[in-house]
Image (cartoon, rainbow, N blue to C red):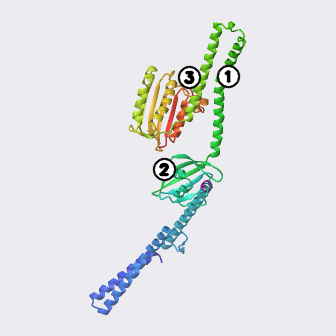
């Protein structure tokens, strides 16, 4: 029976019973009849309430099934056109859609979990309590473990790695060496902090870059050997040739020293002076090379960027004035503080400023800009920009190589030294340049 018809029928029957009850009371039919009708009214009200609640019970059961992810129950459909039938059809359609969505989510979850587990990069996710949620096969192989329950267990494998994972924040990275049955591994550790459903957790990636480092190291050694042999040969070849010439001259006149005149002595002195000068140049070259290999450990302290820029402006004032160069300073926020070795950071900025001064010497617009800000990843950025001639693309890839320089006068170690100082500060140095537009050196501090 249709729900509305049944409901209206019960209301009408209850109304008729109440009318009869009132009639018996008005005509004084006696206690028995009045009691009989009262009982009948009470029974009708109870059945009426049960009938009216029957649909709500179905809705409650339906909602409970959704809460408990039970989508397999089917509601009977008689196709008799009643509202109850329509309600059951809608229930079944909703449950079928939810079941399909659940299956799709489960399939996606299994797919991404499978991809996660079989990536060549080691990946670990863990919550604030340190409990590991997912660890893939590569991470287990890198750490040489069968299973890992809590991130604190890594401390037993390598304390330095555990400390890096604990201290690194979003975007932070560090190189860590760990012992492994297959040999020493050089790991690149990268961390991302995420928030999902109000819960914080970390995603840690571990990548063994030992082979890449060895390849780069070999390439670096080859470049270094090329530079050393080139510089040393440039100095030794004329020294050797000149020394040989002087030796032959002196040997030829040893038998008769009276033939050695003032002009000969001047030639010998000039030759010896040239040898001394070239030898001193070679000593300076070796000294520069030694300075690259012996950068002191940074002494970290708080550095006020605004004050640092002011000090640099005073230091460079004479050069800027003599070359008619405008210096601009941009800070956001103005009270920005950097944690690092002030002496070393000053040295890097001085090197970059000197390069910028050299770059704008022949430019129409001579502007150098010191800027400092915090990027979207929370890293402190210092930039030194100029409006100079720019750097050729071929030279751009070589400017950080020791002793490479585009200047007529220069040792070529300034940028190499700057890069090493930034590495000691767990940071990096980048450059972008456009011919005729200028160059910007970017110092990135990971914090």
Location of mark 2 (residue): 167
Residue 68 percent coordinates (x, y): 50, 69
Q: Residue at x 44, y 34 (%)?
A: 371
For residue 34, above or below residue 87: below
Location of mark 3 (residue): 409
Location of mark 1 (residue): 237
Mark 1 or mark 2, whichever is nearer to me: 1
Residue 26 percent coordinates (x, y): 27, 87
Which type of secondary structure does the marked residue at label 2 adopt? Answer: helix
Q: Nearer the viewer, residue 348 or 5?
A: 348
In the displayed structure, does residue 40 sit left or right of residue 415?
Answer: left
Q: Which residues are magenta?
A: 139-143
Q: Nearer the viewer, residue 36 or 442?
A: 442
Q: Residue 440 in magenta?
A: no
Query: In this rendering, does residue 13 appear at all?
Result: no
Q: Quadrant of residue 228?
A: top right
Dot 3 crowding, Cα within 10 Å, few <14, some 14–19, many 20+: few
Which type of secondary structure does the marked residue at label 3 adopt? Answer: loop
Between disc 1 and disc 3, whose residue precedes? 1
- Could you give the CA–CA distance between mark 1 and mark 3, rounded to whole angstroms? 21 Å
Residue 251 percent coordinates (x, y): 71, 14
Mark 1 or mark 3, whichever is nearer to me: 1
In the displayed structure, does residue 78 sit left or right of residue 256?
Answer: left
Between disc 3 and disc 2, whose residue precedes? 2
């Amino acid at each position: 029976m249709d729900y509305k018809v049944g409901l209206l029928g019960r209301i009408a029957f209850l109304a008729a019973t109440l009318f009869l009850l009132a009639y018996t009371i008005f005509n004084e039919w006696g206690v028995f009849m009045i009691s009989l009708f009262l009982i009948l009214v009470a029974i009708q009200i109870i059945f009426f309430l049960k009938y009216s609640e029957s649909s709500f019970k179905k809705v409650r059961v339906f909602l409970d099934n959704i809460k408990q992810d039970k989508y397999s129950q089917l509601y009977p459909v008689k196709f008799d056109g009643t509202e109850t039938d329509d309600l059951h059809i809608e229930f079944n359609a909703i449950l079928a859609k939810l079941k399909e969505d659940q299956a799709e989510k489960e399939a996606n979850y299994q797919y991404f979990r499978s991809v996660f587990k079989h990536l060549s990069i080691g990946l670990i996710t863990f919550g604030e309590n340190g409990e590991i949620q997912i660890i893939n096969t590569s991470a287990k192989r890198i750490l040489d473990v069968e299973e890992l329950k809590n991130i604190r267990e890594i401390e037993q494998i390598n304390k330095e790695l555990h400390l890096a994972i604990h201290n690194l924040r979003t975007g932070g990275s560090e190189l860590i060496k760990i012992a492994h049955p297959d040999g020493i591994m050089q790991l690149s550790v990268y961390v991302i902090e995420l928030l999902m459903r109000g819960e914080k957790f970390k995603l840690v990636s571990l990548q063994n870059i030992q082979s890449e480092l060895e390849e780069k190291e070999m390439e670096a050694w080859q470049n270094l050997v090329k530079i050393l042999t080139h510089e040393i040969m440039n100095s030794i070849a004329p020294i050797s040739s000149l020394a040989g010439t002087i030796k032959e001259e002196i040997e030829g006149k040893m038998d008769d020293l009276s033939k050695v005149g003032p002009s000969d002595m001047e030639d010998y002195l000039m030759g010896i002076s040239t040898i001394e000068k070239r030898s001193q140049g070679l000593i300076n070259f070796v000294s520069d090379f030694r300075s690259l290999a012996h950068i002191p450990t940074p002494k970290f302290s708080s550095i006020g960027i605004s004050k640092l820029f002011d000090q640099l402006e005073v230091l460079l004032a004479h050069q800027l004035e003599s070359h008619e160069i405008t210096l601009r300073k941009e800070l956001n926020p103005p009270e920005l503080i950097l944690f690092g070795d002030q002496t070393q950071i000053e040295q890097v900025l001085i090197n970059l400023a000197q390069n910028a001064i050299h770059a704008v010497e022949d430019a129409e617009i001579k502007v150098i800009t010191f800027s400092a800000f915090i990027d979207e990843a929370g890293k402190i950025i210092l930039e030194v920009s100029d409006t100079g001639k720019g750097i050729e693309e071929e030279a751009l890839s070589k400017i950080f190589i020791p002793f490479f320089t585009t200047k007529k006068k220069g040792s070529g170690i300034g940028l190499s030294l700057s890069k090493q100082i930034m590495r000691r500060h767990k940071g990096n140095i980048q450059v972008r340049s456009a011919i005729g537009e200028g160059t910007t050196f970017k110092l990135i501090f990971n914090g």
